[in-house]
Image: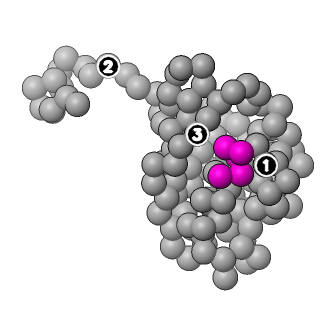
Amino acid sequence: MANAHHVVAAYWAAAEARDWDTFADLVADRVVYEAPQARERVRGRAAYLRFNVEGFPGAWHLQVERIVGEGRHAASWIQFSDAGDHYPGLCFFDLDENGQIARITDFWPTPHELPASRAHLVERY
């Protein structure tokens, strides 16, 4: 069985390097990608590769903050940067029996201001 942590680390390294052949090899033929906030779904390796190559052109970069994996499941926290803007990303992965990524669920929380009603309850950083 493949180590989910290592597979996800290789996935992000391939994405950052724009090594689309390695990237494609890490995902299953029937991979399903979902981004619940935008209600996006992409099915299949070819469509997912196209989604990444054509959907995210430019000089973006990503940095892995943390990967936690166990068995066939992993979660990652990344920092995505593009044109001076930075976005945190949380991504959950499920591997199939062949050790390839079969399911990806992607969340892109956006920063927002602290509501005044909670300001007295927290420490700002």
**Which of the pair 29/22 is nearer the observer?**
22
Q: Nearer the viewer, mark 2 or mark 1?
A: 1
Q: Which residue is mark 1?
A: 19
State the image coordinates of residue 13 (x, y, percent, origin top left).
65, 52
Other-residue count near label 2 (Cα within 10 Å), few / some / many at <14 / 14–19 / ≥20:
few
Q: Secondary structure at mark 3?
A: strand
In this rendering, is residue 98 above or below 19?
Answer: below
Q: Nearer the viewer, mark 2 or mark 3?
A: 3
State the image coordinates of residue 31 (x, y, percent, origin top left).
78, 57
Amino acid type at mark 3: Leu
Q: Would residue 101 be counted in the magenta stretch?
A: no
Q: Would residue 16 be counted in the magenta stretch?
A: yes
In whole angstroms, how far apart are the C-alphas of marks 2 and 3?
24 Å
In the picture, residue 83 is in which quadrant?
Answer: top right
Amino acid type at mark 2: Glu
Q: Which residue is mark 2?
A: 113
Q: Earlier in the sequence, mark 1 or mark 3?
A: 1
Q: Earlier in the sequence, mark 2 or mark 1?
A: 1
In this rendering, is residue 100 above or below 56?
Answer: below
Q: Residue furthest left?
A: 120
Q: Which residue is mark 3?
A: 62
Q: Is residue 116 visible?
A: yes
Q: Residue furthest front?
A: 17
Q: Secondary structure at mark 1?
A: loop
